[in-house]
Amino acid sequence: MASNSSKFSPLILFLLCLLATTISAASRGGIAIYWGQNGNEGTLAATCATGKFPYVNLAFLNVFGNGSNPELNLAGHCDPASGGCVSLSTDIRSCQKQGVKLMLAIGGGIGRYSLSSQLDARNVSIYLWNAFLGGKSSSVFRPLGDAALDGIDFDIELGSSQFYDDLVRYLKSYCSPKQKVYITGAPQCPFPDRLMGTALNTGLFDYVWVQFYNNPPCQYTSGNTTNLINSWNLWSRSIRTKKLFLGLPAATQAAGSGFIPADVLTSQILPVIKKSPKYGGIMLWSKFWDDQSGYSSSVVSEL
Ligand SMILES: *[C@@H]1O[C@H](CO)[C@@H](O)[C@H](O)[C@H]1NC(C)=O
Ligand SMILES: *[C@@H]1O[C@H](CO)[C@@H](O)[C@H](O)[C@H]1NC(C)=O
Ligand SMILES: *[C@@H]1O[C@H](CO)[C@@H](O)[C@H](O)[C@H]1NC(C)=O
């Protein structure tokens, strides 16, 4: 049963894959944005066609693990369960043609998800690979059709912290020179993140967009940048990731607290955080709120 179709060992393939990811990383700051949780935020294709967002996270797969049947929720956009979202493959391909990286965001603030064992983490990784990434299985329905997303974004805000490090490792093991598997994440700013710290410690995350909001001790508060900058510096020193992003609400109503006026961001904060070697840009929650506020348009040229 020997095969000569691959002359590389899995380890070498894995290293090649990491190298490819590093080389393709953009050098100036970009905007990552969440799309999917409001039907009135334009299509995925239109989001990518703005040219403002090199990274788009599709939110959320909010039910998975512990024996559950996984559920994708895309609010008013379409109904994944009835096959109503398979036509998104056309949008996915058009985004990727423009160089936009698309991640499936798993978790979120409302849902039912947890991993009950290492074996469960493996089962979920197989599901994610076959349902959303480069895998194919006749027994697994692909809610977004046959186009393959570029990776998985971890937004674990509920339940237990356990076995997400295993899930990250299993997902990364699918990475090959033919298809990279990006791993990204949106921890809360209190360091280390209570639920995602262990997973982040694997050092396998390509991009980390920390939520510097809804957490007064580590966010911008009324004219004072001290807590935010201190927290950014702590993350920047401590975390092993290729790029670190400043995650922000795109409008005052987009979060309970932590909104930063665009002029404060560009004049007082970007000049400081851009000095960090890991600086990758900003993350915004969400496309819907950005449409209301015009935030990305006000700051994109300053990143
Ligand atoms: C494995 O994952 C599938 C979803 O793909 C789920 O329906 C099933 O219950 C899981 N199996 C176990 C043993 O948890
Ligand atoms: C898994 O589900 C069982 C039964 O519903 C529950 O008792 C248990 O706490 C769950 N485990 C995790 C890690 O969520
Ligand atoms: C800003 O906040 C920090 C930390 O809470 C505090 O020590 C400092 O005095 C504040 N600066 C101003 C100008 O209010």
Image (cartoon, rainbow, N blue to C red):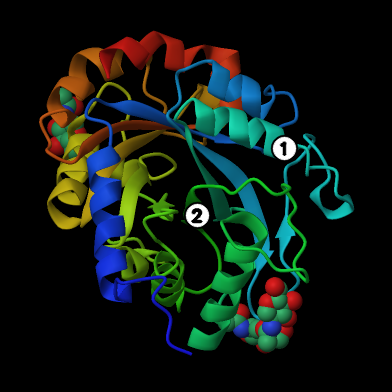
- Quarter of the rendered image showing ligand 2: bottom right
**Which kind of residue does numbered mark 2 sit on?**
Ile
Q: Is residue 141 left or right of residue 35?
A: right
The quarter of the image holding the C terminus is top left
Look at 32% across and 30% down and name the residue there: 221
For residue 117, say whether it is visible.
Answer: no
Q: Relative to 2, does residue 303 appear above or below in the rendering? A: above
Q: Earlier in the sequence, mark 1 or mark 2?
A: 1
| Viewer-proximal residue among 112 and 141 | 141
Crowd class of label 1 (few under 14; some 14 to 19; many from 20; radius 10 Å)? many
Could you say which quadrant of the image residue 229 lies in? Answer: top left
Q: Nearer the viewer, residue 118 or 296?
A: 118
Which of the two residues, 158 or 123, is positioned nearer the viewer here?
123
Dividing the picture into quadrants, the one containing residue 55 is top left
Disc ID at residue 178? none
Element under disc 2: strand
Residue lying furthest right in this view?
A: 82
Name the residue tied to disc 1.
88
Q: Is residue 53 left or right of residue 270?
A: right
